[in-house]
Image (cartoon, rainbow, N blue to C red):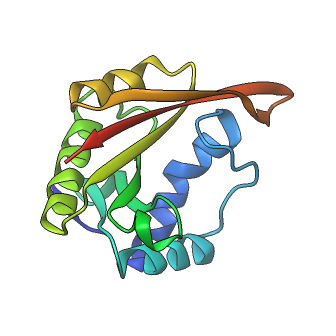
Amino acid sequence: MIRACAAGDAPALCAIYNHYVRDTVITFEEAPVAAPEMAQRIVDVATRFPWLVAEEGNDVVGYAYATPWKARSAYRFSVESTVYVAPGKTGRGLGTALYRELLDELRKQGVHSVVGGIALPNAASITLHERLGFKKIGQFVEIGRKFGRWVDVGYWELIL
């Protein structure tokens, strides 16, 4: 089941996200996020753009949201998308289902362009984005540093 996220989902989202913070370069955040901070992020985003969660039974197993691409007014029809799936729940279509629902909601809001940033290498995320019609539009080389190594970031765009 996919539903709108609520601030009360913050602990479950932290459990998912902090795995990626601690153990991967998928996010460039380097310190785990506490539930109150995550709850504030949810509130800040959900007032303007969709933030969705996927549930299995009573467990949150993934989430997706969009944020403004840039602050300048001419970018108001463009967003950056984010999708995370709980460890052990990947490869089962949850990310695709979340992303499709997110894209549908963004279309309803009149969003024109969706950008996905991917820390490289990340074959699973590239496959997900391209399956949904995103096209690679560029790559920054050694733009971030985490775990003592430089990391490239590629950008994929979908025109809705």
Side (left or right) of 117 relative to 97? right
How many numbered tags mark residues here? Answer: 0
Percent position of residue 6, x then y: 35, 76
Q: Residue furthest front?
A: 74
Question: Which quadrant of the structure image shows residue 20?
Answer: top right
Side (left or right) of 158 relative to 68? left
Side (left or right) of 83 relative to 146? left
**Residue at horizontal 48%, vertical 69%?**
10
Percent position of residue 61, x then y: 34, 49
Question: Which quadrant of the structure image shows residue 97?
Answer: top left
Relative to 110, residue 124 above or below? above
Out of 148 and 134, give the one closest to the viewer. 134
Side (left or right) of 31 relative to 119? right
**Residue at horizontal 53%, vertical 70%?**
71
Percent position of residue 37, x then y: 62, 74
Q: Residue furthest right?
A: 148
Relative to 33, residue 160 above or below? above
Q: Is residue 56 visible?
A: no
**Residue at horizontal 25%, vertical 55%?**
112
Relative to 30, residue 73 above or below? below
Relative to 119, residue 77 above or below? below
**Residue at horizontal 80%, vertical 34%?**
145
Which image quadrant: the N terminus?
bottom left
Q: Is residue 6 visible?
A: yes
